[in-house]
Amino acid sequence: MHQSATLTGRPPSASHLTLSQIMDQHHTNLMGTVHGGRILNLIDSVAGVVAARHSDGPAVTAAIDETAFLRAVRVGDVVHVDARITWAGRSSMEVAVKVSADRWDRAVPPVDVATAQLVMVAIDDEGQPRAVPPLLTETDGDRRRYREAQIRREHRLALRRALLDGAEEG
Ligand SMILES: CC(C)(COP(=O)(O)OP(=O)(O)OC[C@H]1O[C@@H](n2cnc3c(N)ncnc32)[C@H](O)[C@@H]1OP(=O)(O)O)[C@@H](O)C(=O)NCCC(=O)NCCS
């Protein structure tokens, strides 16, 4: 792996991002609500920006897991995609994304519509993993999210190992 000079740690707040967008009629499903793929696209894009901000360069999506769609999004709703780094390793980062929506026709608080966790890997000019700054947790919430992300990482790696072992056994 390409190693940078000593990297200074950064808090999640330095890369935290919320993107808001009005949903139009171009990405609807047969029911006339917004297609899940459109929401996933927004999740992936915003997570990519957050990972690039944390790591000062490009990052690719290695895995998307734990995606839950809680409520349908309607045309005209204002969708808010909120993404923050929860964990950083050598070259990989976990980004947690929460999606909420303001209903276009009602002045009510935003409703939660989706959550997801993504593994993003910082890459160099050759597409190889490169080192990322450590994550500096500042708040109790940061520390809780970091612990939870670490558990998810252990599960992902264990699953990957088990599947590879199974494949070798034929
Ligand atoms: C992501 C990618 C760069 C990883 O390359 P690799 O040769 O497997 O690199 P490594 O095995 O060294 O893994 C790099 C890091 O990613 C993590 N990682 C890779 N795949 C992972 C997965 N499926 N789940 C969790 N972590 C994963 C590793 O644990 C490691 O983390 P660390 O450096 O923080 O310890 C490579 O698989 C790739 O380019 N994939 C395609 C990405 C892409 O195009 N995405 C867009 C979707 S089309």
Image: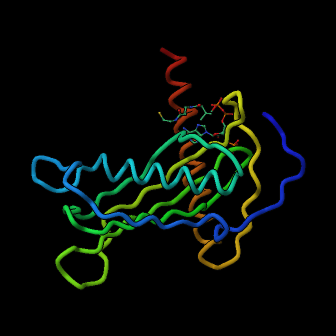
Q: Is residue 103 above or below residue 98?
A: below
Toward which corner of the image does residue 74 lie, by quadrant?
bottom left
Residue under the image location 78 percent in, 33 percent down: 1
Q: Is residue 62 left or right of residue 54?
A: left
Q: How many numbered markers are drawn?
A: 0
Residue pushed farthest left? Answer: 31
Q: Is residue 84 left or right of residue 8?
A: left
The structure's colour scheme is: rainbow
Residue under the image location 58 percent in, 58 percent down: 149
Q: Position of residue 162 (x, y in %)?
A: 53, 32
Residue pushed farthest top? Answer: 170
Q: Is residue 114 left or right of residue 157?
A: left
Query: Quadrant location of ligand 1?
Result: top right
Camera-nearest residue between 5 and 57: 57
Q: Position of residue 28 (x, y in %)?
A: 18, 50
Toward which corner of the image does residue 164 lie, by quadrant?
top right
Q: Is residue 56 above or below residue 23?
A: above
Q: Position of residue 32 (x, y in %)?
A: 12, 54
Q: Is residue 49 above or below residue 147?
A: above
Q: Is residue 2 left or right of residue 65?
A: right
Q: Position of residue 48 (x, y in %)?
A: 54, 49
Toward which corner of the image does residue 43 lie, by quadrant?
bottom left
Residue under the image location 49 percent in, 55 percent down: 46
Residue under the image location 72 percent in, 62 percent down: 135
Camera-nearest residue between 47 and 69: 47
